[in-house]
Image (cartoon, rainbow, N blue to C red):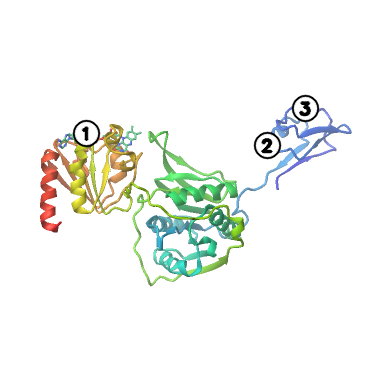
């Protein structure tokens, strides 16, 4: 608890502190200043007291303060019986972070008992040394109330130093609620994470001001745990080793269904399924497409290959294809096995979202286009000739 102490012996009753309080929390009693419950511990009065009669003792907001745990936790997200690949990617990156801090790498897994048991083992196989499992039938499917309650009680009990979530629909909803309940910070949508070698604080990088700058963010040292959501596919998948051993710590959620404000009635899949993040092959079109209707050549090739359709911002901004398809700094980050860029010049901002693809095929009529510098295979030519030829050839070879 924060405290504001007024030393009655030192206080001269000059009243200079009274108007300095923005919350009207100070008054005079028997010629001395007194403080009431309206005080927010802002410290304004401390600075104006001419005789240093006021002392502010600030509460440590750190959930991890005074503990020895200080580990790095990764939220193991799951839906429809499957762990989200971002959780494994975060375990991979978390390993390096934990080594840099000198702490343990742990998973935080919430769910119904039998259903999540295999997920704890999967987390260990991907690098977790410990997995904290909160079990309850209320946690069978993601709902904000029970998930936040479960995470907050685990974090308060075991006090990790850093907690990382995927910047998925679930992670974005969940992490915000957890952070506000714990009164700590949250850096959303990070594209890189590191550890400051001196302070051991989490260094969080994310695009800011519409992607015009990359911001590096450190949390205030008084607020813990440090929390971030991280975009899928910015980190590689770590190797899986089923022989790895780890500890599983089980807890039970102390909550009843009547305390949960939402019920899941039904899941309805969105009409547009653009799953760029999970796609193994992506065929993308840029300004070189020349119009929205021309994307049909991209869709035909994507259809034959079982690929997702991506786009550059130029194509999206021209209204040729919805934003959900945009790849790049202000769109999706992707890491497919094959990325086929058609009529895309390869700007820095586009590359930021796709350059870690395993194989990049560039089709562009300008042999000097920057995309060729990062392409594994380059075809200099008109995409309206080359792409239909590829479609026909793949159709033949794949028998589709
Ligand atoms: C803050 C910020 C964030 C941004 N974020 C993103 C982002 O997330 N994603 C993104 O993509 N961009 C982003 N941009 C925009 C980026 O700078 C480029 O303007 C954009 O990527 C260009 O798209 P493009 O390659 O399709 O178009 P262009 O650069 O115009 O390239 C078109 C290419 O098509 C080729 N071409 C034309 N006709 C044909 C044809 N018939 N056959 C073959 N090739 C042909 C041309 O030779 C050319 O190389 C961002 C910019 C800013 C400032």
Q: Quadrant of residue 253?
A: bottom right
Which is in the foreground here, disc 2 or disc 1? 1
Secondary element under disc 2, as helix, strand or loop, is loop
At which x and y percent is residue 114? 47, 70
Callout 3 touching callout 1 (CB < 8 Å): no
Q: Quadrant of residue 306?
A: bottom left
Q: Which of these two is toward me, 281 or 257? A: 257
Q: Is residue 49 left or right of residue 148?
A: right
Q: Earlier in the sequence, mark 2 or mark 3?
A: 3
The answer, for residue 199, to whether it is visible in the render is no
Labelled disc at residue 291: 1
At which x and y percent is residue 193? 42, 48
Residue drawn where x is 42% and y is 43% of the image? 205
Residue drawn where x is 12% and y is 48% of the image? 390
Which is in the foreground here, disc 3 or disc 1? 1
Vertical comparison of 120 with 316: above or below: below
Q: Which residue is mark 3?
A: 16
Vertical comparison of 16 with 328: above or below: above
At which x and y percent is residue 395? 13, 54
Q: Which of these two is toward me, 139 or 65? A: 139
């Amino acid at each position: 608890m924060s405290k504001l102490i007024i030393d009655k012996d030192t206080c001269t009753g000059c009243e200079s502190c009274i108007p300095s309080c923005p919350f009207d929390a100070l008054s005079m009693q028997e010629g001395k200043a007194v403080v009431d419950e309206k005080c927010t511990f802002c410290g304004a009065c401390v600075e104006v007291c001419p005789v240093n009669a006021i002392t502010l003792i600030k509460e440590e907001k750190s959930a991890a303060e005074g503990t020895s745990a200080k580990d790095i936790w990764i939220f193991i997200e799951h839906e429809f019986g499957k762990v989200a690949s971002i959780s494994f990617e975060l375990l991979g990156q978390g390993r390096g972070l934990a080594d840099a801090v000198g702490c343990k790498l742990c998973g935080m897994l919430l769910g119904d008992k039998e259903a999540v048991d295999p997920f704890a083992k999967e987390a260990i196989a991907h690098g977790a040394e410990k997995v904290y499992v909160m079990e309850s039938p209320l946690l069978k499917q993601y709902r904000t109330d029970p998930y936040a309650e479960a995470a907050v009680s685990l974090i308060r009990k075991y006090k990790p130093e850093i907690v990382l979530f995927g910047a998925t629909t679930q992670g974005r909803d969940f992490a915000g609620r957890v952070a506000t309940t714990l009164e700590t910070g949250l850096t959303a949508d990070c594209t890189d994470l590191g550890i400051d070698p001196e302070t051991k604080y989490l260094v969080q990088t994310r695009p800011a001001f519409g992607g015009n700058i990359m911001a590096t963010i450190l949390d205030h040292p008084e607020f813990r745990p440090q929390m971030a959501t991280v975009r899928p596919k910015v980190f590689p998948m770590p190797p899986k080793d089923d022989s790895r051993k780890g500890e599983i710590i089980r807890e039970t959620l102390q909550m009843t269904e009547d305390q949960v404000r939402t019920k899941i009635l039904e899941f309805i899949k969105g009409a547009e399924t653009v799953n760029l993040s999970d796609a193994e092959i992506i065929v993308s079109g840029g300004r070189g497409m020349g119009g929205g209707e021309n994307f049909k050549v991209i869709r035909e090739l994507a259809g034959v290959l079982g690929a997702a359709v991506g786009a550059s911002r130029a194509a999206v901004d021209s209204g040729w294809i919805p934003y959900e398809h945009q790849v790049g700094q202000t769109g999706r980050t992707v890491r497919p096995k094959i990325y086929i860029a058609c009529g895309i010049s390869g700007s820095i901002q586009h590359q930021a979202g796709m350059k870690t693809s395993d194989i990049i095929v560039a089709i562009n009529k300008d042999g000097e286009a920057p995309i060729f510098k990062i392409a594994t295979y380059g075809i200099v030519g008109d995409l309206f000739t080359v792409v239909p030829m590829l479609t026909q050839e793949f159709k033949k070879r794949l028998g589709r």
